[in-house]
Each structure stands twice: as structure tokens, then as C-alpha cells.
Amino acid sequence: MFSKFAALFALATLAAATPTGNPPPPVTPPTSPQCCNSVQSSTSSAVSAVAALVGLDLTGINVPIGLGCSPITVVGNNCGGTTVTCDAPEVQWGGLIAINCIPITL
């Protein structure tokens, strides 16, 4: 758990130097099973803060967003968070955020 927070702060430092203003990501049907620490509305302040860190503009997007996500690669994986299926997260987002996350049961 500590390593996730350390990674978040390291990425926050890097993201502070990254310009923002990228167009919003496309929302496509969820295809990627993920284990996320939490799932929140794209309009929440926590999601807005993380999106800004990775240079995402979520303006006009109203979908569930997964925070602190990692891929589920084994069926029956003990997630310990929220098991969802999302749009496949971009590598540059570093697992901090995933788009259009719908709860699933494995």
C-alpha cells in the first residue's frame, strides 16, 4: 500500500512539469478487467485532481472513473478493492486512472 502512495507522489512530481490541456480521452465500451482502489464519478474533485496529474481533460465526460487501478490477469484474483471492467487504461497514466469503469463479479 505504501508503494502505491510513493508512486503516486513520484508521478505527481513528474506531472507537475507536464503541460495539460490534452483533448478528453475517447470513451469506448469497457474491455479491460481492473482492480481499482476506488471508483468515482468523473466530476468528483478527487478524479479531477488525478486527471490533472496525468494530463487528462475530463470536461464533458460523465462516466465512472477508477483510481489506483491494476489489471486483473488471473480469474479469481483477490482484488482487495473494486473489481471493474474499464476502457483499457493508457500506459502513460501509470495505473492512476481508468475510464468508464463498470463493476463486475469474478
Image (tube, rainbow, N blue to C red):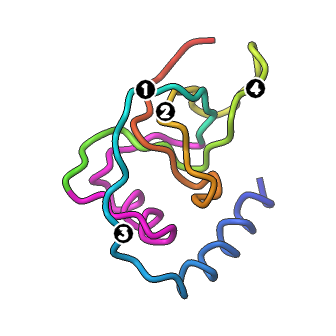
Using residue 92 as the reference point, say whether residue 97 is left or right of it: left
For image coordinates 41% across by 60% down, the residue present is 46
Point out residue 23 in the picture as x, y percentages from the top left corner: 31, 63
Q: Which residue is mark 3?
A: 22
Using residue 45 as the reference point, say whether residue 9 is left or right of it: right
Q: What is the CA distance from the residue labelled 2 to the residue labelled 4?
A: 14 Å
Q: What is the CA distance from the residue labelled 1 to the residue labelled 2?
A: 6 Å
Mark positioned earlier in the residue sequence (3 or 4): 3
Mark 4 Cα within 10 Å, few/some/many (few <14, many 20+)?
few
Q: Amino acid at mark 3?
A: Asn
For image coordinates 49% across by 43% down, the residue present is 66
Disc 3 element:
loop
Q: Which residue is mark 2?
A: 86
Mark positioned earlier in the residue sequence (3 or 2): 3
Q: Which residue is mark 1?
A: 102
Magenta span has 69?
no
Label annotation for residue 73: 4
Point out residue 29 in the picture as x, y percentages from the top left corner: 39, 27
Q: Nearer the viewer, mark 1 or mark 4?
A: 4
Mark positioned earlier in the residue sequence (1 or 4): 4
Q: Give the mark count.
A: 4
For image coordinates 45% across by 27% down, the residue present is 30
What segment carries the magenta color? 37-59
Res. 40 image quadrant: top left
Mark 3 Cα within 10 Å, few/some/many (few <14, many 20+)?
few
Point out residue 81 in the picture as x, y percentages from the top left corner: 63, 34
